[in-house]
Image (cartoon, rainbow, N blue to C red):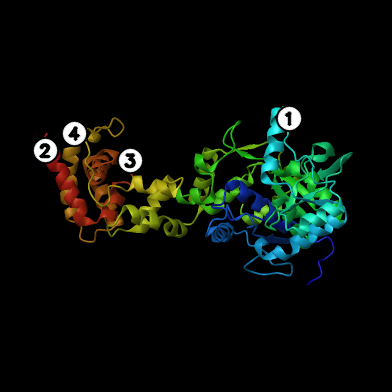
Amino acid sequence: MSVIEMNEVRTRFAPSPTGYMHIGNLRTALYTYLLAMKNGGKFILRIEDTDRERYVEGAVDVIYKTLRDCGLNWDEGPDVGGDFGPYIQSERMGMYKDYAEELVKKGKAYYCFCTKERLEQVSEAQKAAGSSALMYDRHCRNLSQEEIDKNLAEGKPYVIRQAIPLEGATSFHDEIYGDITVENSILDDQVLLKTDGMPTYNFANVVDDHTMKITHVVRGNEYLSSAPKYNLLYEAFGWEPPMYIHVEHIMKDAQHKLAKRDGDASFQDLMEKGYLSEAVLNYILLLGWAPKGENEIFSLDEMIKEFDISGISKSPAIFDPLKLKAINAHYIREMPLEKFVSYAEPYIRQACKRDIDINLLCAGLQPRCEVFTDIAPQIDFIDETLDYPLEMYVSKKSKTTLETSLDCLNKILPVLEGIEDFTKDNVHDKLMALVEQLGVKNGFLLFPLRIALSGKQVTPCGGVELCAILGKDESLSRIKKAIERLSAQ
């Protein structure tokens, strides 16, 4: 086992493989990663898979892929190893019972033989009495050693419960909320080891964090109420507790948490909707953390440089889809065209089978996309002419009518027919020469061309580019059909 450097920061992200990566979990991973990297420490990935009822096959691979897609590479973990493994909780099962029984010997935990039926009766009685907090009644806490030995000899099922002090209070420090003190009388004697020998989350994470030398724990503030119990466990073992950083929830609105059923609650949802991983990561950075300056666009390296715990808010963060989309649009528009093409091509090919100039199309699409799923509706005309009303040719802005549009198309057709090398530049030069010859504005001539080629008043490219994208034969065919329809009016 290697020696940990003095004061080395060691953080961990410990997700349960229960499905997709919720953006709240991803934010925890990001803050945990940034904290380690900012301090030159280690970022550890631990898979907490002891809740077998909620385990989802393939979910571990989703965790790996999500973190790697976001650039959150771990220094130690199940697939990369390390000196403090195993890094999968179910592979660490041998240690938890030993630690639980150590607490029993110290009088900090005890065997509980209560049946499920008895626990339900206790709960119902407390409800009937109007109790606001349902707690175990500590029936087995004061069993004699003779009774305990007899029950164990008979093979009676048992759990091991934490023996919370009956009096006094427990204090702990959180980097966000400061010093917090809780009366021990309101703390339940929580189960540490279940009947099947599996540890509860609240016990396993304490043992794992200590044995993996974790120095800082970032987690949701739903665990804030459990922190006193964690500290009592650290105290019982004589261990140094880690530094706590509890972060607020991500909310759909002021009253409701963001949930998967509401959509866009997972990283995978957002990827399927055409978002960029770096834009999502940038956005969730800002969900509960405020930079010191005005800038809100950060690369991962810039996040490491700028991140500071003091910027984490005590208030819940409201998920704003419009802001996320705006950040995503910024990333799309700032990327080199070549990179945009590589991202956009799968979306283009889903909507378009025709052999076209992808680069030329993407040059028009890039400034008009906020997410990549915006692409398909913009290019639905490429494979086949849309059925469009002739009234589309009438435009106050371009000052076109049905009659002027027909006249323009009749003048455009022979010009395009005469172009042998049907490139964008050649089409542009010939049509601009026609504009000058007719003494009209560009839009007066090119607006009817756009309609004839696409059946849409708004397209990702102008008429010149559409000609080059569709090619000569298809462009001429569509113009002739448009002339035929307009002539029949």
State how far apart marks 2 and 4 are (Cα).
Answer: 9 Å
- The disc label shown at residue 402, or none: 4
Q: Which one is nearer the viewer's eye here, 356 or 162?
A: 162
Q: Which of the marked residues, 1 or 4, is nearer the chain's N terminus? A: 1
Furthest residue to the right? 168
Residue type beneath disc 1: Ser
Residues under numbered marks 4 and 3 in contact, where contact means CB atoms less than 8 Å apart: no
Residue placed under numbered mark 3 in the picture: 458
Across and down, in percent, residue 306 comes to: 70, 50
User: Which quarter of the figure has residue 116?
Assistant: top right
State how far apart marks 1 and 4 are (Cα).
Answer: 78 Å
Per the image, label 4 sits on a secondary structure element best described as helix
Residue type beneath disc 2: Ser
Residues under numbered marks 2 and 4 in contact, where contact means CB atoms less than 8 Å apart: no
Furthest residue to the bottom? 1
Q: Which of the marked residues, 1 or 3, is nearer the chain's N terminus? A: 1
Residue type beneath disc 3: Val
Q: Which of the marked residues, 2 or 4, is nearer the chain's N terminus? A: 4
User: In the rendered image, which quarter contains the N terminus?
Assistant: bottom right
Residue 381 vs residue 318: left or right? left
**Circle 1 or circle 3, nearest the eye:** 1
Q: Is residue 135 visible?
A: yes
Q: Which of the marked residues, 3 or 2, is nearer the chain's N terminus? A: 3
Across and down, in percent, residue 372 comes to: 43, 50
Residue placed under numbered mark 2 in the picture: 487
Residue placed under numbered mark 1 in the picture: 131
Residue in the image at 61% along x and 51% along y: 26
